Amino acid sequence: MTRNVTQSSPPAFDEEKQTWKEYKKELIMWKSLTSLETKKQGPALYLSLTGKAKEIVKDLDSEEIIANDGIDTMTQAMEAFFKKDENQEAYITYKQFEEYKRPKSMTVRDFIIKFESLHSKLKSLKMELPEGVKGYRLLHSANLTKEENKLCLATIK
């Protein structure tokens, strides 16, 4: 998921579209490239948060947020709430994989890249799909026309 992130603006967290693990990685990447001094990273993150994430950190004292480790304090508070156990993470990841469909505006090449990315996430959670199931999901999720689908099926050995 590509985001428009600047050095001074931390990534936004959308819990509907990404896992806590994915967001935390983006936040770590942002921290490594930002030129903001550490005292300003906490306030920048605070101002970028919305929804449940904002609710979780809004009761922190301003001094805690502005401190040199303010961003870490907020990250720990959010992690306690958003971090999923392995079963929850596996469920969410499989659901994303299962429900993914290529938008008509997306090229098949870009779709295959996204599909492989979703499949890699499954594999990282030790969820291996048989080749036949993976092939079915690829064809089904490609969102092809009936004619394109028939052509694909006719060329499969």
Image (tube, helix red, strand yellow):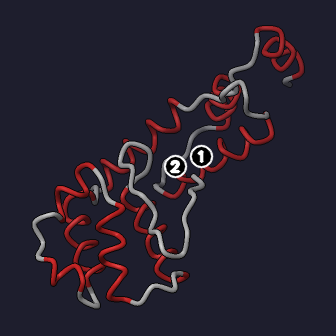
**Placement of 70 over or under 112, stated as above or below:** below
Where disc 1 sits, the SS reads: helix
Residue furthest to the top: 146
Residue at (57, 40) in percent of width and height: 129
Where disc 2 sits, the SS reads: helix
Quadrant location of the C terminus? Answer: top right
Q: Where is residue 137 in the image (x, y as percent from the top left)?
A: 62, 29
Q: Position of residue 85 (x, y in %)?
A: 27, 56
Q: Residues within 10 Å of mark 2 (few under 14, many from 20)?
A: many
**Placement of 1 over or under 75, stated as above or below:** above
Residue at (29, 91) in percent of width and height: 68
Q: What's under tag 1, amino acid-wise?
A: His
Label 1 and label 2: CA atoms lie apart by 5 Å
Q: Position of residue 62 (x, y in %)?
A: 16, 77
User: How many marks overall?
Assistant: 2
Q: Position of residue 109 (x, y in %)?
A: 80, 40
Residue position for label 1? 119
Tell me where residue 33 sits by quadrant: bottom right
Residue at (45, 76) in percent of width and height: 28
**Placement of 89 over or under 104, stated as above or below:** below
Image-based side of 115 in relation to 15, left or right:
right
Q: Are marks 1 and 2 in contact (CB under 8 Å)?
A: yes
Residue position for label 2? 122
Q: What's under tag 2, amino acid-wise?
A: Leu
Q: Residues within 10 Å of mark 1 (few under 14, many from 20)?
A: many
- Relative to the observer, which residue lies in front, 108 or 40? 40
